[in-house]
Image: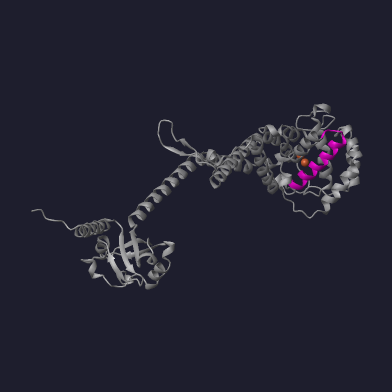
Protein backbone atom coordinates (compact mmCIF):
# COMPACT_ATOMS: atom_id res chain seq x y z
CA UNK A 1 0.00 0.00 0.00
CA UNK A 2 1.41 3.33 -1.06
CA UNK A 3 1.92 6.01 1.53
CA UNK A 4 0.05 9.23 0.67
CA UNK A 5 2.27 12.30 0.93
CA UNK A 6 0.85 15.47 2.41
CA UNK A 7 1.62 18.36 0.04
CA UNK A 8 1.41 20.87 2.90
CA UNK A 9 3.97 18.95 4.96
CA UNK A 10 6.21 18.59 1.93
CA UNK A 11 6.13 22.34 1.37
CA UNK A 12 6.86 23.01 5.02
CA UNK A 13 9.79 20.60 4.87
CA UNK A 14 11.09 22.28 1.69
CA UNK A 15 10.80 25.73 3.31
CA UNK A 16 12.60 24.42 6.38
CA UNK A 17 15.40 22.99 4.21
CA UNK A 18 15.67 26.24 2.29
CA UNK A 19 15.91 28.17 5.57
CA UNK A 20 18.68 25.87 6.78
CA UNK A 21 20.52 26.21 3.47
CA UNK A 22 20.14 29.98 3.61
CA UNK A 23 21.39 30.03 7.19
CA UNK A 24 24.26 27.79 6.16
CA UNK A 25 25.15 30.14 3.31
CA UNK A 26 24.99 33.14 5.64
CA UNK A 27 27.21 31.32 8.14
CA UNK A 28 29.76 30.66 5.41
CA UNK A 29 30.03 34.31 4.37
CA UNK A 30 33.41 35.87 5.15
CA UNK A 31 31.64 38.96 6.51
CA UNK A 32 30.11 39.12 9.98
CA UNK A 33 26.37 39.57 9.91
CA UNK A 34 24.19 40.75 12.77
CA UNK A 35 20.42 41.02 12.71
CA UNK A 36 18.81 43.35 15.20
CA UNK A 37 15.32 44.56 15.81
CA UNK A 38 14.37 48.21 15.53
CA UNK A 39 15.57 48.84 19.10
CA UNK A 40 19.05 47.46 18.27
CA UNK A 41 18.63 44.20 20.15
CA UNK A 42 20.48 41.27 18.63
CA UNK A 43 18.19 38.73 16.97
CA UNK A 44 20.77 36.60 15.13
CA UNK A 45 24.45 36.60 14.24
CA UNK A 46 26.23 34.41 11.70
CA UNK A 47 29.02 31.87 12.34
CA UNK A 48 31.76 34.35 11.39
CA UNK A 49 30.46 36.74 14.03
CA UNK A 50 30.32 33.98 16.62
CA UNK A 51 33.96 33.12 15.86
CA UNK A 52 35.00 36.76 15.97
CA UNK A 53 33.39 37.30 19.37
CA UNK A 54 34.84 34.02 20.68
CA UNK A 55 31.47 32.69 21.89
CA UNK A 56 30.19 29.15 21.38
CA UNK A 57 26.73 29.85 19.96
CA UNK A 58 24.79 32.84 18.75
CA UNK A 59 22.34 32.28 21.59
CA UNK A 60 25.04 33.63 23.92
CA UNK A 61 24.38 37.10 22.50
CA UNK A 62 20.72 36.75 21.77
CA UNK A 63 18.55 39.57 23.17
CA UNK A 64 21.61 41.64 24.08
CA UNK A 65 21.92 45.19 22.83
CA UNK A 66 24.17 45.49 19.80
CA UNK A 67 26.70 47.81 21.43
CA UNK A 68 27.22 45.28 24.24
CA UNK A 69 28.97 42.99 21.72
CA UNK A 70 31.72 45.56 21.15
CA UNK A 71 33.08 46.95 24.43
CA UNK A 72 35.27 49.55 22.63
CA UNK A 73 32.31 51.13 20.93
CA UNK A 74 29.67 53.48 22.24
CA UNK A 75 25.95 53.14 22.03
CA UNK A 76 25.98 56.44 20.15
CA UNK A 77 27.94 54.87 17.26
CA UNK A 78 25.24 52.23 16.74
CA UNK A 79 22.44 54.67 17.33
CA UNK A 80 23.74 56.83 14.50
CA UNK A 81 24.12 53.76 12.32
CA UNK A 82 20.57 52.60 12.97
CA UNK A 83 19.04 56.08 12.73
CA UNK A 84 20.17 56.57 9.14
CA UNK A 85 19.72 53.14 7.55
CA UNK A 86 18.37 54.62 4.31
CA UNK A 87 21.82 56.03 3.56
CA UNK A 88 23.33 52.57 3.73
CA UNK A 89 26.22 54.40 5.21
CA UNK A 90 29.42 52.50 5.89
CA UNK A 91 31.39 53.38 8.99
CA UNK A 92 34.87 52.15 9.46
CA UNK A 93 36.33 51.70 12.93
CA UNK A 94 38.72 49.55 14.90
CA UNK A 95 37.42 46.81 17.18
CA UNK A 96 39.18 43.99 19.01
CA UNK A 97 38.52 40.33 18.26
CA UNK A 98 38.25 37.57 20.85
CA UNK A 99 42.08 37.44 21.14
CA UNK A 100 42.27 41.17 21.77
CA UNK A 101 43.75 41.86 18.30
CA UNK A 102 42.71 45.22 16.81
CA UNK A 103 40.82 44.77 13.56
CA UNK A 104 39.77 47.47 11.13
CA UNK A 105 36.07 46.83 10.45
CA UNK A 106 33.56 48.42 8.15
CA UNK A 107 29.95 48.53 9.42
CA UNK A 108 27.20 48.74 6.83
CA UNK A 109 23.44 48.43 7.00
CA UNK A 110 22.09 46.72 3.93
CA UNK A 111 18.47 46.55 4.86
CA UNK A 112 15.96 48.86 6.46
CA UNK A 113 13.89 48.21 9.54
CA UNK A 114 10.96 49.86 7.81
CA UNK A 115 10.68 46.91 5.43
CA UNK A 116 11.18 43.93 7.74
CA UNK A 117 11.43 45.33 11.25
CA UNK A 118 15.00 44.03 11.22
CA UNK A 119 18.30 45.64 10.67
CA UNK A 120 20.90 43.60 8.79
CA UNK A 121 24.31 44.86 9.73
CA UNK A 122 27.21 43.60 7.68
CA UNK A 123 30.59 43.96 9.37
CA UNK A 124 33.53 43.51 7.03
CA UNK A 125 36.97 42.94 8.53
CA UNK A 126 39.16 44.93 6.13
CA UNK A 127 42.33 44.80 8.22
CA UNK A 128 44.16 42.55 5.76
CA UNK A 129 43.04 44.65 2.78
CA UNK A 130 44.28 47.79 4.53
CA UNK A 131 47.59 46.13 5.36
CA UNK A 132 47.98 44.98 1.74
CA UNK A 133 47.04 48.43 0.40
CA UNK A 134 49.48 50.11 2.80
CA UNK A 135 52.20 47.72 1.67
CA UNK A 136 51.49 48.46 -2.00
CA UNK A 137 51.56 52.19 -1.27
CA UNK A 138 54.83 51.84 0.64
CA UNK A 139 56.34 49.91 -2.28
CA UNK A 140 55.18 52.53 -4.76
CA UNK A 141 56.62 55.33 -2.66
CA UNK A 142 59.88 53.46 -2.24
CA UNK A 143 60.09 52.86 -6.01
CA UNK A 144 59.31 56.54 -6.70
CA UNK A 145 62.00 57.73 -4.26
CA UNK A 146 64.49 55.29 -5.76
CA UNK A 147 63.65 56.50 -9.28
CA UNK A 148 64.00 60.13 -8.25
CA UNK A 149 67.20 59.67 -6.33
CA UNK A 150 68.69 57.66 -9.22
CA UNK A 151 67.59 60.36 -11.64
CA UNK A 152 69.03 63.15 -9.49
CA UNK A 153 72.34 61.38 -9.16
CA UNK A 154 72.42 60.67 -12.85
CA UNK A 155 71.40 64.13 -14.03
CA UNK A 156 72.79 66.41 -11.34
CA UNK A 157 76.07 64.87 -10.27
CA UNK A 158 77.95 65.78 -13.39
CA UNK A 159 76.78 69.42 -13.59
CA UNK A 160 77.53 69.88 -9.87
CA UNK A 161 81.05 68.55 -10.36
CA UNK A 162 81.62 70.92 -13.27
CA UNK A 163 80.36 73.86 -11.19
CA UNK A 164 82.61 72.98 -8.26
CA UNK A 165 85.72 72.62 -10.40
CA UNK A 166 85.04 75.73 -12.48
CA UNK A 167 84.22 77.83 -9.39
CA UNK A 168 87.49 76.76 -7.80
CA UNK A 169 89.46 77.67 -10.94
CA UNK A 170 87.71 81.01 -11.17
CA UNK A 171 88.40 81.77 -7.53
CA UNK A 172 92.09 80.96 -7.99
CA UNK A 173 92.29 83.15 -11.08
CA UNK A 174 90.66 86.12 -9.35
CA UNK A 175 92.80 85.69 -6.24
CA UNK A 176 95.94 85.81 -8.36
CA UNK A 177 94.83 89.26 -9.56
CA UNK A 178 95.45 88.97 -13.29
CA UNK A 179 92.99 86.48 -14.65
CA UNK A 180 93.19 85.34 -18.24
CA UNK A 181 89.91 86.67 -19.69
CA UNK A 182 89.52 83.60 -21.87
CA UNK A 183 89.78 81.25 -18.89
CA UNK A 184 87.49 83.41 -16.79
CA UNK A 185 84.85 83.50 -19.48
CA UNK A 186 85.06 79.75 -19.99
CA UNK A 187 84.70 79.09 -16.25
CA UNK A 188 81.80 81.50 -15.98
CA UNK A 189 80.11 80.09 -19.02
CA UNK A 190 80.41 76.54 -17.72
CA UNK A 191 79.15 77.51 -14.26
CA UNK A 192 76.18 79.35 -15.68
CA UNK A 193 75.21 76.67 -18.18
CA UNK A 194 75.41 73.93 -15.57
CA UNK A 195 73.54 76.01 -12.97
CA UNK A 196 70.89 76.72 -15.59
CA UNK A 197 70.67 73.02 -16.38
CA UNK A 198 70.22 72.12 -12.72
CA UNK A 199 67.63 74.88 -12.28
CA UNK A 200 65.65 73.53 -15.23
CA UNK A 201 65.83 69.98 -13.92
CA UNK A 202 64.62 70.99 -10.49
CA UNK A 203 61.82 73.03 -12.05
CA UNK A 204 60.93 69.90 -14.01
CA UNK A 205 60.60 67.89 -10.81
CA UNK A 206 58.23 70.50 -9.39
CA UNK A 207 55.96 70.42 -12.42
CA UNK A 208 56.24 67.11 -14.25
CA UNK A 209 53.97 66.69 -17.25
CA UNK A 210 54.86 63.08 -17.91
CA UNK A 211 56.95 60.27 -16.48
CA UNK A 212 59.49 59.42 -19.13
CA UNK A 213 62.25 56.98 -18.31
CA UNK A 214 65.55 56.17 -19.89
CA UNK A 215 67.95 53.25 -19.62
CA UNK A 216 70.59 53.92 -16.99
CA UNK A 217 73.09 51.76 -18.82
CA UNK A 218 72.43 50.38 -22.33
CA UNK A 219 73.31 46.81 -21.37
CA UNK A 220 71.10 46.83 -18.26
CA UNK A 221 67.36 46.74 -17.90
CA UNK A 222 67.22 49.35 -15.12
CA UNK A 223 65.40 52.48 -16.13
CA UNK A 224 65.49 55.78 -14.34
CA UNK A 225 63.30 58.83 -14.49
CA UNK A 226 64.31 61.23 -17.24
CA UNK A 227 63.67 64.52 -15.48
CA UNK A 228 64.11 66.70 -18.53
CA UNK A 229 61.73 64.65 -20.66
CA UNK A 230 59.27 64.29 -17.80
CA UNK A 231 59.11 68.02 -17.23
CA UNK A 232 58.21 68.70 -20.83
CA UNK A 233 60.88 71.38 -20.70
CA UNK A 234 61.68 72.29 -24.28
CA UNK A 235 63.44 75.57 -23.73
CA UNK A 236 64.70 77.15 -26.93
CA UNK A 237 68.35 78.10 -27.33
CA UNK A 238 67.49 81.77 -27.22
CA UNK A 239 65.36 81.39 -24.08
CA UNK A 240 68.14 79.44 -22.45
CA UNK A 241 70.65 82.14 -23.46
CA UNK A 242 68.42 84.87 -22.06
CA UNK A 243 68.10 83.08 -18.75
CA UNK A 244 71.82 82.50 -18.52
CA UNK A 245 72.60 86.11 -19.36
CA UNK A 246 70.02 87.28 -16.84
CA UNK A 247 71.85 85.30 -14.18
CA UNK A 248 75.14 86.73 -15.36
CA UNK A 249 73.94 90.33 -15.37
CA UNK A 250 72.60 89.92 -11.85
CA UNK A 251 75.98 88.61 -10.77
CA UNK A 252 77.68 91.51 -12.54
CA UNK A 253 75.50 94.03 -10.73
CA UNK A 254 76.67 92.67 -7.39
CA UNK A 255 80.32 92.66 -8.45
CA UNK A 256 80.19 96.09 -10.06
CA UNK A 257 77.95 98.57 -8.26
CA UNK A 258 76.08 100.72 -10.77
CA UNK A 259 76.30 98.15 -13.55
CA UNK A 260 72.53 97.89 -13.91
CA UNK A 261 72.03 101.64 -14.09
CA UNK A 262 74.84 102.12 -16.60
CA UNK A 263 73.66 99.20 -18.74
CA UNK A 264 70.07 100.45 -18.71
CA UNK A 265 70.88 104.08 -19.56
CA UNK A 266 73.47 103.24 -22.23
CA UNK A 267 70.91 100.91 -23.74
CA UNK A 268 68.25 103.64 -23.87
CA UNK A 269 70.57 106.28 -25.33
CA UNK A 270 71.90 103.86 -27.95
CA UNK A 271 68.34 103.03 -29.02
CA UNK A 272 67.47 106.74 -29.40
CA UNK A 273 70.59 107.48 -31.43
CA UNK A 274 69.95 104.42 -33.64
CA UNK A 275 66.38 105.58 -34.34
CA UNK A 276 67.65 109.12 -35.01
CA UNK A 277 70.03 107.65 -37.60
CA UNK A 278 67.03 106.16 -39.39
CA UNK A 279 67.66 102.54 -38.49
CA UNK A 280 64.61 100.27 -38.49
CA UNK A 281 62.83 99.21 -35.34
CA UNK A 282 64.34 95.71 -35.35
CA UNK A 283 67.88 96.94 -35.88
CA UNK A 284 67.46 99.60 -33.21
CA UNK A 285 66.09 96.96 -30.83
CA UNK A 286 69.10 94.74 -31.52
CA UNK A 287 71.38 97.69 -30.70
CA UNK A 288 69.43 98.41 -27.54
CA UNK A 289 69.97 94.82 -26.41
CA UNK A 290 73.63 94.78 -27.42
CA UNK A 291 74.20 98.04 -25.53
CA UNK A 292 72.79 96.51 -22.40
CA UNK A 293 75.51 93.88 -22.35
CA UNK A 294 78.42 96.03 -23.61
CA UNK A 295 80.28 95.94 -20.28
CA UNK A 296 79.36 92.43 -19.22
CA UNK A 297 83.03 91.43 -19.46
CA UNK A 298 83.71 93.54 -16.37
CA UNK A 299 82.70 90.54 -14.34
CA UNK A 300 86.15 89.20 -15.20
CA UNK A 301 87.92 92.24 -13.71
CA UNK A 302 89.12 91.99 -10.10
CA UNK A 303 87.26 94.16 -7.57
CA UNK A 304 90.51 95.89 -6.56
CA UNK A 305 90.66 97.46 -10.02
CA UNK A 306 86.97 97.79 -10.78
CA UNK A 307 86.15 99.53 -7.51
CA UNK A 308 89.36 101.52 -7.15
CA UNK A 309 88.74 105.21 -6.50
CA UNK A 310 90.79 107.63 -8.60
CA UNK A 311 92.92 106.75 -11.63
CA UNK A 312 94.32 103.38 -12.57
CA UNK A 313 97.99 102.57 -13.10
CA UNK A 314 99.07 101.51 -16.59
CA UNK A 315 99.14 97.92 -15.46
CA UNK A 316 95.67 98.14 -13.93
CA UNK A 317 94.34 99.89 -17.02
CA UNK A 318 95.67 97.05 -19.15
CA UNK A 319 93.67 94.61 -17.02
CA UNK A 320 90.59 96.84 -17.19
CA UNK A 321 90.78 96.92 -20.99
CA UNK A 322 90.43 93.14 -21.11
CA UNK A 323 86.73 93.49 -20.27
CA UNK A 324 86.05 93.97 -23.98
CA UNK A 325 87.44 90.58 -24.98
CA UNK A 326 85.98 88.90 -21.90
CA UNK A 327 82.56 90.27 -22.84
CA UNK A 328 82.96 89.01 -26.40
CA UNK A 329 83.89 85.52 -25.22
CA UNK A 330 80.98 85.44 -22.79
CA UNK A 331 78.37 86.46 -25.35
CA UNK A 332 79.75 84.84 -28.47
CA UNK A 333 78.55 81.26 -27.72
CA UNK A 334 74.92 82.46 -27.90
CA UNK A 335 73.81 82.82 -31.54
CA UNK A 336 71.03 85.23 -30.54
CA UNK A 337 73.69 87.51 -29.00
CA UNK A 338 76.12 87.71 -31.93
CA UNK A 339 75.55 91.50 -32.24
CA UNK A 340 76.00 91.96 -28.51
CA UNK A 341 79.27 90.04 -28.63
CA UNK A 342 80.60 92.35 -31.38
CA UNK A 343 79.55 95.45 -29.43
CA UNK A 344 81.16 94.16 -26.21
CA UNK A 345 84.38 93.60 -28.16
CA UNK A 346 84.39 96.87 -30.12
CA UNK A 347 82.75 99.57 -27.99
CA UNK A 348 86.15 101.03 -26.97
CA UNK A 349 87.49 101.19 -30.51
CA UNK A 350 88.02 104.75 -31.79
CA UNK A 351 86.95 106.05 -35.18
CA UNK A 352 90.52 107.22 -35.84
CA UNK A 353 92.00 103.80 -34.96
CA UNK A 354 93.44 104.81 -31.57
CA UNK A 355 91.10 102.66 -29.48
CA UNK A 356 91.34 99.13 -28.15
CA UNK A 357 91.51 96.16 -28.17
CA UNK A 358 92.13 95.71 -31.91
CA UNK A 359 92.78 99.27 -33.06
CA UNK A 360 89.95 99.15 -35.63
CA UNK A 361 89.02 102.38 -37.42
CA UNK A 362 86.14 103.91 -39.37
CA UNK A 363 83.71 101.38 -40.78
CA UNK A 364 85.84 98.47 -39.61
CA UNK A 365 84.08 99.12 -36.33
CA UNK A 366 80.55 97.72 -36.45
CA UNK A 367 77.95 100.52 -36.62
CA UNK A 368 76.23 99.16 -33.51
CA UNK A 369 79.51 99.51 -31.58
CA UNK A 370 80.06 103.06 -32.90
CA UNK A 371 76.59 104.01 -31.62
CA UNK A 372 77.05 102.30 -28.27
CA UNK A 373 80.45 104.03 -27.85
CA UNK A 374 78.75 107.45 -27.84
CA UNK A 375 75.86 106.34 -25.59
CA UNK A 376 78.37 104.70 -23.24
CA UNK A 377 80.55 107.83 -23.03
CA UNK A 378 77.55 110.08 -22.40
CA UNK A 379 76.26 107.96 -19.53
CA UNK A 380 79.75 107.44 -18.10
CA UNK A 381 80.38 111.21 -18.05
CA UNK A 382 77.02 111.92 -16.49
CA UNK A 383 77.28 109.31 -13.78
CA UNK A 384 79.33 109.75 -10.65
CA UNK A 385 81.60 106.76 -10.43
CA UNK A 386 84.15 105.65 -7.88
CA UNK A 387 86.92 106.87 -10.18
CA UNK A 388 85.43 110.13 -11.50
CA UNK A 389 83.11 112.96 -10.64
CA UNK A 390 79.82 113.60 -12.41
CA UNK A 391 79.88 116.34 -15.03
CA UNK A 392 76.95 118.34 -16.39
CA UNK A 393 74.97 117.16 -19.41
CA UNK A 394 76.00 120.21 -21.40
CA UNK A 395 79.69 119.69 -20.67
CA UNK A 396 79.31 116.03 -21.57
CA UNK A 397 77.73 116.99 -24.90
CA UNK A 398 80.58 119.40 -25.66
CA UNK A 399 83.28 116.88 -24.74
CA UNK A 400 81.65 114.21 -26.88
CA UNK A 401 81.22 116.57 -29.84
CA UNK A 402 84.90 117.47 -29.64
CA UNK A 403 85.69 113.81 -30.28
CA UNK A 404 83.78 113.71 -33.59
CA UNK A 405 86.06 112.07 -36.16
CA UNK A 406 88.56 111.13 -33.42
CA UNK A 407 87.06 108.79 -30.88
CA UNK A 408 83.55 108.85 -32.38
CA UNK A 409 81.92 108.45 -35.79
CA UNK A 410 80.84 111.94 -37.05
CA UNK A 411 77.55 110.48 -38.35
CA UNK A 412 76.74 109.13 -34.91
CA UNK A 413 77.72 112.42 -33.26
CA UNK A 414 75.37 114.25 -35.63
CA UNK A 415 72.49 111.97 -34.63
CA UNK A 416 73.49 112.35 -30.97
CA UNK A 417 73.31 116.15 -31.33
CA UNK A 418 69.97 115.95 -33.13
CA UNK A 419 68.32 113.90 -30.40
CA UNK A 420 70.17 115.46 -27.49
CA UNK A 421 67.04 117.14 -26.08
CA UNK A 422 65.29 113.77 -26.06
CA UNK A 423 68.33 112.19 -24.43
CA UNK A 424 68.44 114.94 -21.84
CA UNK A 425 64.78 114.41 -21.01
CA UNK A 426 65.44 110.70 -20.57
CA UNK A 427 68.42 111.51 -18.39
CA UNK A 428 66.33 113.78 -16.12
CA UNK A 429 63.69 111.07 -15.81
CA UNK A 430 66.34 108.53 -14.83
CA UNK A 431 67.76 110.97 -12.26
CA UNK A 432 64.31 111.51 -10.73
CA UNK A 433 63.58 107.82 -10.66
CA UNK A 434 63.60 106.28 -7.22
CA UNK A 435 63.93 102.80 -8.68
CA UNK A 436 66.62 100.78 -6.91
CA UNK A 437 69.84 100.13 -8.75
CA UNK A 438 68.87 96.60 -9.54
CA UNK A 439 68.03 94.67 -12.63
CA UNK A 440 64.39 94.25 -13.48
CA UNK A 441 62.74 91.77 -15.83
CA UNK A 442 62.56 94.53 -18.47
CA UNK A 443 66.30 95.05 -18.33
CA UNK A 444 67.05 91.45 -19.13
CA UNK A 445 66.99 90.70 -22.81
FE1 LIG B 1 83.29 99.33 -21.50
FE1 LIG C 1 80.41 101.11 -20.38
Q: Which residues are magenta?
A: 259-280
Where in the figure is residue 336, as x and y percent of width and height?
Answer: 70, 33
Picture quadrant of residue 268: top right
User: What colour scheme governs how the chains and residues are painted in the rendered image of this protein?
Assistant: one colour
- Is residue 356 found left or right of 233 in the rendered image? right
The reply to whether residue 284 is in sight is yes
Find out whether residue 265 is within the magenta segment.
Answer: yes
What is the number of callouts on the image?
A: 0
The reply to whether residue 179 is in sight is no
Taking the spot 66% from the left edge, 32% from the top edge, the residue there is: 333
Judge whether 11 appears above or below 293 on screen. below
The answer to which of 38 and 442 lies nearer the viewer is 38
Judge whether 144 appears above or below 332 on screen. below
Where in the figure is residue 130, as x and y percent of width and height?
Answer: 36, 55
Which residue is most to the top? Answer: 364
Quadrant position of ligand 1: top right
Picture quadrant of residue 366: top right
Which residue is most to the front? Answer: 1
Picture quadrant of residue 122: bottom left
- The quadrant of the rendering that contains the C terminus is top right
What secondary structure characterizes most of the magenta part? helix
The answer to which of 319 and 385 lies nearer the viewer is 385
Find out whether residue 347 is within the magenta segment.
Answer: no
Where in the figure is residue 236, as x and y percent of width and height?
Answer: 63, 36
Which residue is most to the left? Answer: 1
Where in the figure is residue 345, as x and y percent of width and height?
Answer: 74, 33
- Is residue 117 found left or right of 181 in the rendered image? left
Amino acid sequence: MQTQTNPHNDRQAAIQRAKQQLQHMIDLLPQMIVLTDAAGTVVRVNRRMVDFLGISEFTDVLDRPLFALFPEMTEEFFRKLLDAPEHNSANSTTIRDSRGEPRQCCFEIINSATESDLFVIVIDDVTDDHTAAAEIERNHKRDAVRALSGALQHHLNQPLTVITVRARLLQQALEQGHPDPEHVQRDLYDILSQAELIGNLLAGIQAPVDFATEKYLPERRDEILDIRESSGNRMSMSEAATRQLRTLTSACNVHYSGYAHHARETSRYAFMIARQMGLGEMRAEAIRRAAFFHDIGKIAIPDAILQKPGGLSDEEMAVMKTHTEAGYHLLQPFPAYADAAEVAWSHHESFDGSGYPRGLSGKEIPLSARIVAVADAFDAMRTKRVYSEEISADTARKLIKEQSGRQFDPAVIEAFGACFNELYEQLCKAAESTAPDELTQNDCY
